[in-house]
């Protein structure tokens, strides 16, 4: 059973996603979709860089305690993202022809770290 985050946490998450999206657009990526949701999960940002499709997980943490933002994308979360991306590509077959990768944007109050190709399909 999943619980809805409190409004303040939800607002912080949306702010972090907006910050990440702007950062990636400044780096030349193009936004395709934000908050893609299906029964398997959610992908925060789907971007395009050249001919590559980029599935982006945005993680915000107020501190680096407990491993920080990037460490929170554990193998279980990675599998969920991979399954959700697969569903997205089934719904958008024209995009399935493009190379794809999974990036993570890890945000704290003082840093934004873009981890390209953070994990791969096993």
Image (spheres, rainbow, N blue to C red):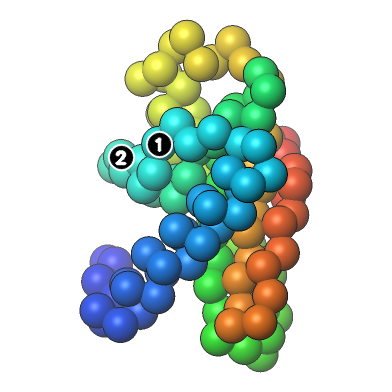
Label 1: which secondary element: strand
For the residue pair 81 and 98, the one nearer the viewer reads as 98
Which residue occupies 48% across, 67% down?
16
The Cα atoms of the two marked residues, 2 and 1, are separated by 13 Å
Image-quadrant location for residue 40: top left
Residue 102 screen position, x and y as percent: 64, 42
Q: Viewed as shown, does residue 98 lie left or right of 87?
A: right
Quadrant location, the N terminus: bottom left
> Residue 22, relative to residue 6: is it above or below?
above
Q: Is residue 82 visible?
A: no
* Residue 68 in the image: above or below residue 70: below
The tag on residue 9 is none
Q: Is residue 84 visible?
A: yes
Disc 2 crowd, CA 10 A, few/some/many (<14, 14-19, 20+): few
Cβ atoms under marks 2 and 1 closer than 8 Å: no
The residue depicted at 66 percent of the width and 37 percent of the height is: 28
Residue 38, labelled with which disc? 2
In the rendered image, residue 15, in percent from the top left (x then y), is placed at: 41, 68
**In this figure, which residue is indicated by the disc labeled 1?**
33
């Amino acid at each position: 059973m999943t619980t809805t985050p409190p409004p303040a946490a939800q607002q912080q998450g949306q702010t972090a996603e907006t910050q990440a999206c702007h950062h990636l657009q400044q780096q030349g990526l193009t936004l395709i979709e934000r908050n893609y949701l299906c029964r398997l999960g959610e992908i925060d940002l789907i971007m395009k860089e050249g001919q590559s499709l980029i599935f982006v997980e945005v993680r915000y943490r107020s501190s680096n305690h407990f491993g920080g933002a990037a460490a929170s994308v554990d193998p279980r979360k990675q599998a969920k993202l991979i399954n959700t991306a697969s569903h997205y590509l089934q719904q958008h077959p024209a995009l399935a022809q493009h190379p794809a990768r999974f990036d993570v944007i890890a945000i704290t109050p003082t840093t934004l770290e873009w981890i390209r190709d953070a994990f791969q399909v096993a």
